[in-house]
Amino acid sequence: MSFGTPWLLVALLIVPAVLGLALWFERRRTRYAVAFTNLDLLASVVAERRRPWRRWIPLALFLVALVAASAALARPRLNLSVPSNRATVVLLVDVSGSMRASDVKPTRLGAAQHAMDVFSQKVPKGVKVGLVSFSTGPNVLVTPTTDREVLQEGIDLLAPEAGTAIGDGLGVAVSVVKASVGDAPRGKDGKLPGAIVLLSDGAQTRGVLTPLQGAARARNAGIRVFTVVLGTDHGTLGFGPFGGYGFGGGFGNGGRRFPVRPDPVTLAAIAHATDGQTYRATTAAKIDSIYKQLGKSIAHHSATREVSSWFSGLAALLLIGSLGAARLTGERLP
């Protein structure tokens, strides 16, 4: 926290002054009670001694109200996370054949689709979200939009295909983000108000650009890439006897099963190269949690806001509470 006019914090000196005045009044009242005792007054003094802490509630609330009011005078400022204006997020999702694997229920792709739906519900409404899929090559399914229904339609169209071209997918996603944010100013960190969320369950098998070449394009453009590694190390995929995928990822008649392991090292390198973060999801619940977290935090930036009104409001509430407590306890404020 910082202050626009920190010298006004000298107003806080009123707090110890009021406390000293209150203690002085309390001392005088005690002397008066001893000099002019009667049975009723003696009974009240005994009751006060049984509940000494209640006597100080009104004063404590009053002093805290003074602290809040004094701080408000100094124009306090906080660094807050706020949605970025003209921000864009591109969901870049792997739709290679291995996304049929069912080690993440119901399938890897099914879990990813549900997680992206969760993301669209959590991300600020003013943020544009696009969808790019990649297998043997990239495909822009939804250009960045604030229309969540259009985005949902694109998510529903996802289906497993063939290879894994991570680098090419990144290259296209970078172009989509840049076209969407246009001439929006960069932040203090040199980043555009845009990000890419890359989900993949395997290593690159196709494409022109390598994953790190794609990451370099994102870094040079000032775009962070958040990577999500989907799948378990024991995930497998079944093939039928004639070379096709077995029904439901099973063996089929005479089919074989092949391991389809994720590639966390490559995805971590992409995130590191672009100042993003990497996550690992081995269950449907975990991937939902990751996308929910990203939806709440991504496309935000740090901004300094004056919060004098917060402190003024707090001071008013505390003052009302102090008056109410004084009425209940029968105590008088200084």
Image (cartoon, rainbow, N blue to C red):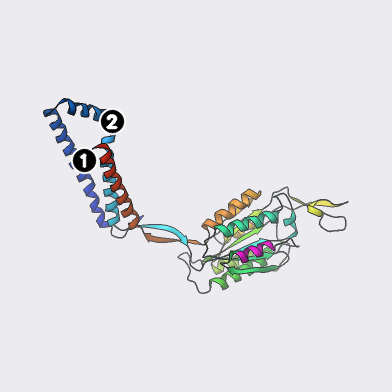
In this orientation, which residue lies closer to the viewer: 91 or 41? 41
Which residue is label 2 attached to?
51
Q: Would you say the residues marked 2 and 1 are in contact, meaning their CB atoms lie under 8 Å apart? A: no
Q: Residues within 10 Å of mark 2 (few under 14, many from 20)?
A: few
* Foreground residue among 85 and 152: 152
Magenta region: 149-161
Amino acid on which the number 1 mark rests in the picture: Arg
The numbered mark at residue 332 is 1
The residue most toward the front is 40
Q: Secondary structure at mark 2?
A: loop
| 21, 162: nearer the viewer | 21
Indicate the amino acid at tag 2.
Arg
Answer left or right for 303 relative to 173: left
* Mark 2 to mark 1 CA distance (whole Å): 16 Å
Magenta stretch, overall SS:
helix
Q: Position of residue 124 (x, y in %)?
A: 52, 61
Which residue: 61% across, 52% down? 288
Earlier residue among tags 2 and 1: 2
In the image: residue 189, left or right of residue 111: left
Image vertical order of residue 219 relative to residue 21, above or below: below
| Residue under the image location 19 percent in, 38 percent down | 23
Badge 1: residue crowd in 10 Å (few <14, some 14–19, many ≥20): few
Q: Residue at x 35, y 55 (%)?
A: 310
In the rendered image, residue 314, in percent from the top left (x then y), is placed at 33, 51
Quarter where residue 119 is shown: bottom right
